[in-house]
Amino acid sequence: MSAPASSAPATRPVVPPGATLESPAPLPMVDQPAVPFIEIETLRSKEFIPAAKEALGSLIVEQGQTKVVRPVFNWAGRNSLFPLHWGLACCAIEFAAAFGARWDAERFGVVPRSSPRQCDVMIVNGTVTWKVAHKLITLYEQMPEPKWVIAMGNCATGGGPFRTAYSVVPGVDKLVPVDVYIAGCPPRPEAMLDGILELEKLIRERKE
Amino acid sequence: MSEMWINMGPQHPMTHGLWNLRVLIDGEMIVDVDPEMGYLHRGIEKISEDRHYNEVITLMDRCCYVAGFAWEHLYIIASEEALHLEPPERAQYLRVLCDEFQRIASHLMWYAAFVQDLGLMSPFLYGMRDRDLVLDLFQSYTGARMTYEYMRVGGVRSDLPPGFTDHARKVLDWLTDRFVEYDQLCLGSDIFRKRCDDLGTLKATDCVTHGVTGPMLRSAGQKRDLRKDRPYAVYDQLEFDVALADSADVTGRYLVRMEEMRQSVRLLRQVLDWLDRHPGPVLADRLPRWLGAPYAPVGKEGYLLKRNYPKGVGFSAVEEPHGEAQAYVVNEGGEHPYRVKFRSPVFANISAARQYLVGYHVADIPPIMGSVDVCVGEVDR
Amino acid sequence: MEPVDLTAALGPVLGDRLLGVEAFPRSAGRIRFERSGALDLFRAVRDSLGFRHLSMVGGIDWTDHREVFYVVWSDDRREYLFLSTDVPADDPHVESASGIWPSANWHEREAWELVGIEFDHHPDLRHLLTPDGYEFRPLLRSFKLHEPEELEVKTRHV
C-alpha cells in the first residue's frame, strides 16, 4: 500500500535543517489507525475506494507511511494468526485441546495451517531433538515474513525433563529466534491462549 | 509409469506426531513404504539409569502422552517386582481406575483425530469435549490433565477426594449415551463406510508374525487381551468382555475401540463400587526412605535398606490402549535402575506398515494410519 | 510350562549350547543359551513350542559383556518366555532373529544402534531412532550424560 504519486499535494512539509527525520514524540499506539470519519453510505458505494485512497493518502503524506500503514497491518496480522499445524510431543495434545469445544482457540483468529507457506507463527509444542533440528529450521525458513515463534512448554523452552538426554536440543532458541515462552509441562490450553495473546501484544507494538 | 519416493512427514497432517512415512508410489498406488522414526527420540531409557525409581514415573507420563497412566502402571509393576514390594489392595483398584479412565481418554483422542482425518469435523469437537470431562476427573485427584505422576513404587500418591465416585458415575452415564451418538455419526455415514471398509486389511496370522497387538489384532478376530490372559493388578476379580471384530480392516478397528470404551465403563462401575466400600491405605508402609514415601521408616532402617537392598529383575506387560506394552527393569542394588527397557506396542504396529499399506492408494494412507493410532512418544521413547 | 519341561524340550535340540533354564517373573522362564545355537533355539521355540509372537529384543551392557534378550509369547499357552544370551563386549555378534520372527527387524535395529549389538544376516541394519551416521552407542555404561552444553558436539546431527 502506498500513496499515489499524483495525489502528493504541494504543501509537503519541509524538514527544517538540523532536525531529525523522525518525529520527536512517538505516536500513541491505537487499535484503529487514525483515519478520517467516513459515512456508512460511503462505505457501500462505489466511491469508497477513491475516498479511502484520498483520506489515507493525505494522512500518509502528513504522518509518514509507516505510522499509518503499520497499525493497519498489525491489527490485521495479530487477529489472524495462522500457526503451523504440527505436533512434536505432549504439548501437541494440549495444543489440539485448545482447538476443541471447551477452549475454541479459533475465536482469537488462530487457525492451524498445514503448509508452512501459509503460516506466520510456529508453535514449537514439544521436545526438539537434534534429529529434527534441521527440519525445524527448514520449516521456519519456508514461512513467509513476518513470522514469530512460540516455545510452548518446558522442553521447547529449555529441554524440560529431558535436558540431560543425549538427543535433545536444550531449548529451541538454540535454533530459531523465539518471541514468546510458555511455561508448563505441558501448559494448559489456557496457558497456550495466554501465549497467543502475549504474542498479539508484541505484534501490536511492532514498528518496522 | 515410473515410481518415485515421497515423504509424508515429519510435518504432515496425517502423521499425528513427528515421524516420516516414506512412500514409494506408482501413480496413485503404494508400492512400498519405509517409516522413518526417531524424530522424538528423547533417550528415556538412558535418563532412567540416572534417576531414582520414583523419578522415572515423570518420564513415563511423557513417554506416551495420551496414555500416561498405562505407562506409569507398566513401569510400576516391573519396578515393584525388581524391588520386592507389594502395594495395598486399594492402590491396585485405584490403578485400575486410572487405567480404564485413561483408556477412554486415549480412545476419545484417537476418535477425535482419526475421524477428523476423514473430513468429518464435528466428531473432533465431540471427542475433545468428552475427553475433557475425563481429564477433569484426573485433575481432581492428581492435579494434572496429562502428566499425572500419581502412581508410586509401592502404591499410589494419594487417595480420591470426597465425592469423586459420584461425580465419576455421572461422567460414565454421560459417556454411555455419547457412544451411541458416535456410532450414529460414523457408522451411519456412507462416506465413512466407503472410506474405511476393506481398507488396511491385516489378517490375524500376519499380525502375530509381525508383532502387531492391541485393537489391530483384536479387530482380526484374535481374542488376546493381557487383562484376561495374564491378569495384572485386580483384573482377575472384575467382569468384562474382550472387544472383538472379524473384518481386520479400518472399520473393524473402529468397532473394537468403541466396544473397548463400553467395556471400560463396565469395569469402572465395578471399581467405583469397590472403592466406595473398602477404605484403606494406598501406599505400602515399609518403604525404603529413598523411595520418598511420606510415612516411610526414617533413620537407621531406611539407610540399611538403602545399602543392602536385594538385587532383582522385574518384568511386566500391560494392555495399553494401543496394544501390549512391556517393561523390563533390572535392579542391581542402589537407588537407580541399572537398565530399563520398554516395549512399545505402536513401535511394532508401525514396523508392520508394509503389510497393511502396500497395494492401496495414497489417499488411503490417512485412514489406515489413523486407525493404527500412532503415539510417537512411545515409539521413539 | 515349567522350567523342567523347557529343559526336556530344548535339551535334545541344543545339547550343551543350552546353558540353563531359570524361573523368571511373569513368564514361563528364562532360557540362557550359547550364541552359536541361536537359530536352532529360535526355530525350536517357534515351531515345536509354539511361541510365534516375538514381543521385544533388547540389549544390556554389563561392562565386561553384553546380554541380548528376547521375549516371546505363545497364543496357545498364554505365556511369555525369555531367551537370553551373552556376547563378549569386544565381539558383540549374534545371529539375527528376523528370519524366524519378522517382527525382530526393528527391535534389532534399535538394539544395534543403542547398545551396539551386531546382528549378523540382518536384512536392513540401519539407524532407526538416532540420525544416520550417529557413531555413539548411548545405552552403553561408558556413555555418560553431561550438561547439554558439553554434549552438544557429541550429539549434533552429522
Image (tube, helix red, strand yellow):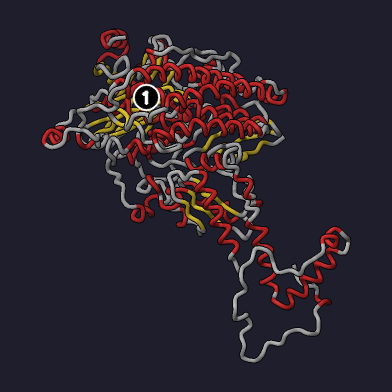
| Residue B351 makes an appearance in the image | no
Q: Considering the numbered disc 1 on the image, is that residue within a helix, a strand or a loop? A: helix
Of residues C141 and A93, which is closer to you in this image?
Answer: A93
Single out the residue that lies furthest toward the left.
B300
| Residue C66 makes an appearance in the image | yes
Quarter of the rendering containing residue A55: bottom right
Quarter of the rendering containing residue A144: bottom right
Image spot of residue B341 (x, y percent): 35, 31
Q: Is residue A3 above or below residue B277?
A: below
Residue bearing mark 1: B94
Image spot of residue B103 (x, y percent): 48, 26
* Residue C58 appears left or right of B26: left
* Residue B130 appears left or right of A131: right
The residue lying at 66 percent from left, 60 percent from top is: A75
Single out the residue that lies furthest toward the bottom.
A17
Number of numbered discs present? 1
Image spot of residue B189 (x, y percent): 70, 23
Q: Type of residue at label 1?
A: Leu
Badge 1 crowding class, 10 Å Cα cut-off, few under 14, some 14 to 19, many 20 or more, is many
Image spot of residue C17 (x, y percent): 27, 18
- Picture quarter with the N terminus of chain C: top left
Single out the residue that lies furthest toward the front.
B163
Of residues A207 and C139, which is closer to you in this image?
Answer: A207
The residue lying at 42 percent from left, 9 percent from top is: C76
Q: Disc 1 is attached to a residue of which chain? A: B
